Image (cartoon, helix red, strand yellow):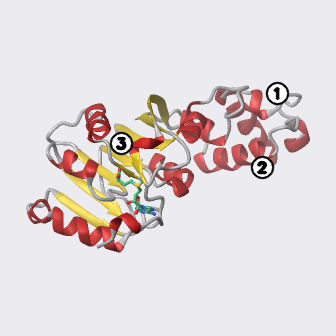
Amino acid sequence: MHLELMSRYSQNFLINPKIADYIVKEAEIKPNDIVLEIGPGKGILTGKLLEKCEVYAIEIDKTLCEYLNIIFQDDIKDGRLHLICGDALKVNFPKFNKIVANIPYHISSPLLFKILEYEFERGILMLQYEFAERLVAKPGSKRYGRLSVMMYYNGEARILKRVKRGNFRPVPRVDSAIVKITKKDRFCYDKDKLNEFVRKLFEQRRKKIRNILGEVPYGDRRVEELSPEEICEVVQYADRIRN
Ligand SMILES: C[S@@+](CC[C@H](N)C(=O)[O-])C[C@H]1O[C@@H](n2cnc3c(N)ncnc32)[C@H](O)[C@@H]1O
């Protein structure tokens, strides 16, 4: 099997076991935890997770799935590893309380929004550095956007560590970041409506809000300057006057 030749599906494999150890340590895994791993690849994280708890792993690549089926056959037989060969954007996630993943970069955004729909305690995710900056960005900064606001309403994200591109094979064009996500629902408004308005506002981030939604609170400001709570006030008001 020519695993090294495969470059589809954002396959930049982590080759530094110390970083894999760090990710697993930050997940603070207890024996009763159920960890969901997205994109196990060649299993560098999977093996370390299996030493600690039960794991569900979703891998889209059939060849990798066959490979994982062989190298982890004992864990699969024991019911400790549940390997799901499929697209993480399409399959329903099983019940889990922690999520660990070196995220396939081409689907970071939809995958993150999907992950945030589930209830869990902690996520330790490897993301492209710039994407991680968008998750934790503050109002008024260049990277502040829809992702930052929706992250705020679903939990807390913190960049734990920068990971240089040389720790992956093939070497990607950008560095990565290990991000810790603690799930916490902060209520603002109906989630779908919040999402819809936040998307609409950030699509026109340089416009004054009143030129997008009419007369609403903070109408003379731009969405990129407003905190998530201020955006929430705008959304509540705009949806009420719409109905
Ligand atoms: C960045 S690699 C990480 C691999 C491994 N976890 C590691 O750290 O070396 C991303 C992995 O996600 C898989 N993948 C890509 N798109 C996927 C999808 N939609 N659903 C599930 N797995 C996917 C790839 O085949 C690859 O194994």
- The residue sitting at 57% across, 41% down in the picture is 131
The label shown at residue 218 is 1
The label shown at residue 243 is 2
Whichever of callouts 2 and 3 sits on the residue coming sooner in the sequence is 3
Tag 3: residue type? Phe
Q: Is mark 2 within 8 Å of ligand 1?
A: no
Which element is circle 1 on? loop
Rendered location of residue 115, percent (x, y): 45, 50
Q: CA distance from mark 3 to mark 1?
A: 34 Å
Q: CA distance from mark 2 to mark 3?
A: 34 Å
Compared with 187, 82 (above or below) is below
Tag 1: residue type? Tyr
Q: Nearer the viewer, residue 67 or 119?
A: 67
Tag 2: residue type? Asn
Which element is circle 3 on? loop
Q: Residues within 10 Å of mark 3 (few under 14, many from 20)?
A: some
Q: Nearer the viewer, mark 2 or mark 3?
A: 3
